[in-house]
């Protein structure tokens, strides 16, 4: 059996190829792809090599590189000894954009019937945002600034609303993104670059600044001005992973205000749930599904583009040249 696969074969080079599907071994399952969501920030950094030599990005991205980590599929076959899954189960798991997957049966997480394929495809990004919101250790009534209203920013806004933030101030120069953020829980939106938004944010927070600021841009130059938006003893959450960490600079606010800088990453959650650390990636997927199923979070209206896998070169070309017009971009594998 052959599987259609998407690869980055060089800087700004996208190819769709076929590969043989390996046999299903004991403890494994065969999954047929249904939908996969492009992580537009991460995948564009990888495709354009928008990172410095020697960074973890440089060590990770080796061509041919298989992009993607937000796959929704249906189990077609189970290997010997597998009892947790059966053919017909809809599941999610973090693997690249490809038609067929043979994976360890412990990887996939079942999707509830109430959650659609497209909604489920946000599971990985929802976990990344949820992990950051947990790291912030919010208190009810926090004033929060979210810098960057891309995919992670939109999800973070919704989690902050559920957390009971007093104000959710979203800063992004792209008006369409701000409109979406406003519709999903932002209390104030500011269509400026962060360097130009400080006075307005201070006015909104009685001159003190925010308790928590999220930098979700992945742009190194945002780091320093983000620090100036915090009140004394505030927290800066780094959720956008820049490819140019050497260009991130501290300001005197860190010392004089006693600020905390907290880095977060998808690999931070524990691999197994314990009483002291219950929130694994899988548990956060499930909580996201709960919120979506009962209408506490909405992602279906954040999808702006849909492509077939054969259209992958056009999809990535669009994202590399005008990402401001795109939000959720989905590959639909069901017609293959």
Image: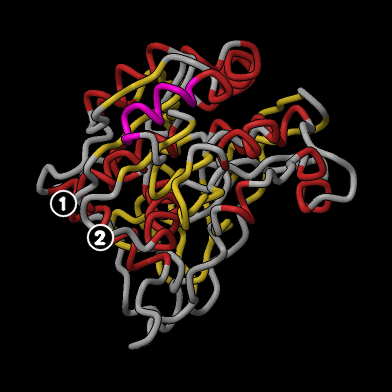
Dominant SS type (magenta): helix
User: What percent of the width, then of the height, locates residue 151?
Assistant: 43, 33
Q: Which of marks 1 and 2 is in front?
A: 2
User: What percent of the width, then of the height, locates residue 110?
Assistant: 29, 61
**39 horizontally vs 118: left or right:** right
Q: Magenta stretch: give its range.
A: 197-206
Between residues 1 and 36, which one lies in front from this camera angle? Answer: 36
At horizontal 53% and vertical 58% (from top left) the residue drawn is 266
Neighbourhood count class around disc 1 (C-alpha, 10 Å): few under 14, some 14–19, many 20 upward:
few
User: What percent of the width, then of the height, locates residue 223?
Assistant: 63, 39
Residue 19 seen in the current view: yes
Query: Quadrant of residue 181 in the image?
Result: top left
**188 horizontally vs 94: left or right:** left
User: What percent of the width, then of the height, locates residue 71?
Assistant: 45, 47
Residue 17 seen in the current view: no
Q: What element carries label 2?
A: helix
Query: Quadrant of residue 85 in the image?
Result: bottom left
Q: How is the image coloured?
A: secondary structure
At horizontal 39% and vertical 78% (from top left) the residue drawn is 82
Quadrant occupied by the C terminus: top left
At horizontal 48% and vertical 69% (from top left) the residue drawn is 269
In space, the residues marked 1 and 2 are separated at their CA atoms by 15 Å
Name the disc covering residue 113, or none. 1
Q: Name the residue under label 2.
A: 287
Name the disc covering residue 75, or none. none
Q: Earlier in the sequence, mark 1 or mark 2?
A: 1
Give the answer, above or below, for where 288 lies relative to 271: above
Between residues 23 and 243, which one lies in front from this camera angle? Answer: 243
Neighbourhood count class around disc 2 (C-alpha, 10 Å): few under 14, some 14–19, many 20 upward:
some
**82 horizontally vs 319: left or right:** left
């Amino acid at each position: 059996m052959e599987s259609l696969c998407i690869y980055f074969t060089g800087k700004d080079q996208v190819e769709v190829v076929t590969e043989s599907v390996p046999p299903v071994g004991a403890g494994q399952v065969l999954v047929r792809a249904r939908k996969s969501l492009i992580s537009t920030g991460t995948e564009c950094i990888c495709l354009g090599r928008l990172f410095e030599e020697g960074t973890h990005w440089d060590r990770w991205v080796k061509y041919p590189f298989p992009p993607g980590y937000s796959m929704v599929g249906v189990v077609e076959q189970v290997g010997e000894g597998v009892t947790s899954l059966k053919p017909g189960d809809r599941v999610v798991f973090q693997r690249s954009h490809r038609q067929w997957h043979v994976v360890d049966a412990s990887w996939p997480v079942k999707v509830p019937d109430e959650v659609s394929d497209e909604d489920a495809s946000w599971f990985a990004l929802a976990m990344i945002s949820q992990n950051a919101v947990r790291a912030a250790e919010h208190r009810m009534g926090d004033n929060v600034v979210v810098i960057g209203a891309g995919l992670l920013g939109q999800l973070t806004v919704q989690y902050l609303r559920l957390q009971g933030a007093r104000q959710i101030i979203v800063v992004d120069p792209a008006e369409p993104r701000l409109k979406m953020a406003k519709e999903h829980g932002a209390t104030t939106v500011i269509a400026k670059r962060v360097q130009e938004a400080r006075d307005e944010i201070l006015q909104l927070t009685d001159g003190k600044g925010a308790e928590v600021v999220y930098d979700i841009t992945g742009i190194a130059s945002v780091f320093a001005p983000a620090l100036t938006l915090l009140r004394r003893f505030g927290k800066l959450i780094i959720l956008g992973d820049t490819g140019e960490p050497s260009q991130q600079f501290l300001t005197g606010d860190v010392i004089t205000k006693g600020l905390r800088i907290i880095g977060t990453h998808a690999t931070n959650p524990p691999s197994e749930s314990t009483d002291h650390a219950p929130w694994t990636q899988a548990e956060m997927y499930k909580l996201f599904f709960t919120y979506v199923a009962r209408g506490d979070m909405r992602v279906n209206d954040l999808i702006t583009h849909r492509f077939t896998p054969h259209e992958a070169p056009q999809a990535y070309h669009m994202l590399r040249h005008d990402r401001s017009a795109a939000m959720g971009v989905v590959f639909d594998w069901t017609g293959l």
